[in-house]
Image: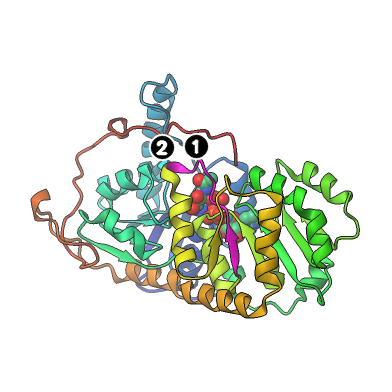
Amino acid sequence: MKSKNPKSLHVLIACGGTGGHLFPGIAVGEVLSARGHDVTLLISEKKIDSIAASGHKDLRFEKMPFLAMPRPWSPKMLGFLSGLWKGMAQCRKIIRQNEVSVVLGMGGFTSFAPLYAGKKEKCRTLIHESNAIPGKANKLNARYANTVLCGLEACIPHFSKHGDVRAVGTPVRSAMRTQSQEDPYEFFKLDPSKKTLLIMGGSQGARGVNRVVGMTLEQFEKMGIQVLHIAGPTDYEEVRDVYAKHLMLSQHVAAFCHRMDMAYRVADLAIARSGASSMSELAWFGVPSVLIPYPFAADDHQTRNAEVFASAGAARLLTEKEMNADVLADIVREILMNPERAEEMKRAAQKMAVRDSAEKIADLIEKGEPMPAPVSSSTVKPASTGGGKTPSTKPKGPSNHKAKSKSKHRR
Ligand SMILES: CC(=O)N[C@H]1[C@@H](OP(=O)(O)OP(=O)(O)OC[C@H]2O[C@@H](n3ccc(=O)[nH]c3=O)[C@H](O)[C@@H]2O)O[C@H](CO)[C@@H](O)[C@@H]1O
């Protein structure tokens, strides 16, 4: 049993809404909890949140409504503002009842209310941005955060007006970090003598990738490789039916994978969207990848993420526009049939891993450095130097911020 830490804190981690916020939030929660702190993870009512939480009976979860910023003059704006208002009241109650002293927001508008409430209740506030460029929500959240944590160095300049910005990597949950004795090939009923291609599309699956991969199966079959395809809940049946026409190809198709550690362990190469958590896990397991950014991601942040790995030699960036069955097959062949190239990419991927990211964040939370004294906005220090400006606690409503207008329907 874990012992109670005499300097125990109660930390509220707002990580609802998407796998990319949830799993790193859980990773930090696990480390803090193991160190004897109390942790409450705020998740949303979305299905993915419940799926993620179900594997962590030892952690305490509270639900609050999922909030996405509508377009500025959309009729949904009223509902959004009322959701924010209710969310803030709920968070202030949680903070007071549990004597929360630190609030960590993992991104998205769902973490705005907890952060703002934390600021009002005089908690220390931190945000984590895992992408190479920040989203609108985190740009706003940064105003209420004492410390901004970035997953990638590339993101730091985007917070140059903030006084305390640090690169800490994106945490990988403990289930991934523990070396399992189970045989991953046995787990997926795959053949250990064959090269394995992992196809994954983030927490929801990726329709564009699923469809093109479906058209490439014949070529994969000819290469003598096998495929582990995580299709996402929406496309699962369609993808499974396509594979059923290629029974000579060793395969495992799943809607959702609860053991991504096993998936990464069998993978010789991954074809994936460039979501930040997926990338931090690919790096952790040293899996070379072909990254196909989701073309409608806010401000094209998935392309910026993929560029970081591509320029380090850890991944090949392929845009959805360029992607077709022949191009994909050529790239897979070029990497998988060339062990030196695959090894180089593997080593480059491993170098991108920040293995103590969750611990670094927990250290910063524990350190409880005094909050930087308020300074005027004209005396802002350069990024990553620490110290500097305390965000104003004056409400600056999100209604000042323009909403993303691109399609939310394709993945
Ligand atoms: C379309 C979009 O805007 N996506 C964003 C979203 O991605 P999304 O929520 O898809 O997040 P990521 O790709 O970063 O991570 C997916 C997470 O889900 C887990 N997983 C996935 C599939 C599965 O079957 N089992 C499973 O456990 C992975 O192990 C990983 O931990 O948040 C990320 C973090 O801000 C962003 O970088 C992404 O750009």
Residue at position x 19%, y 39% from top? Answer: 394
The disc label shown at residue 188, or none? none
Does residue 287 lie above or below 239 as drawn?
Answer: below
Residue 200 placed where, x, y %?
Answer: 65, 55
Residues drawn in magenta = 288-298
Cβ–Cβ below 8 Å for labels 1 and 2? yes
Query: Taking 46 as reference, is 185 left or right?
Result: right
Q: Secondary structure at mark 1?
A: loop
Residue at position x 80%, y 43% from top? Answer: 237
Query: Taking 84 as reference, is 49 left or right?
Result: right
| Image coloring type | rainbow
Query: Taking 222 as reference, is 12 left or right?
Result: left
**Mark 2 Cα shell of 10 Å, populated few (<14), some (14-19), many (≥20):** many
Q: Amino acid at mark 2?
A: Gly
Q: Which residue carries the number 1 mark?
A: 65
Residue 159 placed where, x, y %?
Answer: 27, 54
Q: Which of 256/286 is in front?
A: 286
The disc label shown at residue 87, or none? 2
Q: Amino acid at mark 1?
A: Pro
The quadrant of the picture occupied by the C terminus is top right
Query: Taking 239 as reference, is 374 left or right?
Result: left
Residue 367 placed where, x, y %?
Answer: 29, 71
Residue at position x 83%, y 61% from top? Answer: 221
Residue 229 placed where, x, y %?
Answer: 74, 56
C-alpha span from label 1 to label 2: 7 Å
